[in-house]
Image (cartoon, grey):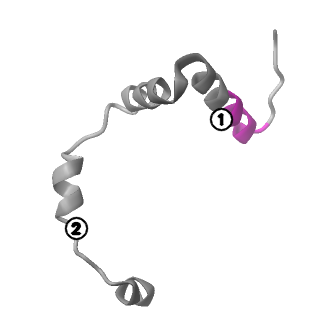
């Protein structure tokens, strides 16, 4: 089966659906992490080291 996809958005959409169908949501996420190099740093540590901004402070930014 051949698909003629013109826009990159179409390729991305079809590819994402194919990964999801073939691997399921967790498998797709794991594949994308590996494809992206697996990420860097320590997310958990960095998550808790972020400043605790109020909604007003965020809106003022």
Q: Main secondary structure of the magenta part?
A: helix
Please say if 35 is above or below 60.
above
Decide which of tag 2 and tag 1 comes sooner along the chain: 1
Residue in the foreground of this view, choosing between 1 and 8? 1
**In the image: residue 42, left or right of residue 29:** left
- Local packing at callout 2 (Cα closer than 10 Å; few below 14, some 14-19, many 20+) is few
- The image quadrant of residue 6 is top right
- The image quadrant of residue 29 is top left
Give percent across and percent down for residue 5. 80, 29
In the rendered image, which residue does mark 1 sit on? 12
**In the image: residue 53, left or right of residue 4:** left
Picture quarter with the C terminus: bottom left
Residue at 20% x, 50% y: name it: 44
Residue at 58% x, 23% y: name it: 19
- Numbered range of the magenta stretch: 7-14
Please say if 29 is above or below 56.
above
Magenta stretch contains residue 12: yes
């Amino acid at each position: 089966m051949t698909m003629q996809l013109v826009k990159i958005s179409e390729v991305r959409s079809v590819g994402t659906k194919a990964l999801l169908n073939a691997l399921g949501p967790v498998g797709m996420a794991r594949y994308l992490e590996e494809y992206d190099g697996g990420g860097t740093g320590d997310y958990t540590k960095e998550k808790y080291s972020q400043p605790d901004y109020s909604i007003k402070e965020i809106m003022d930014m």
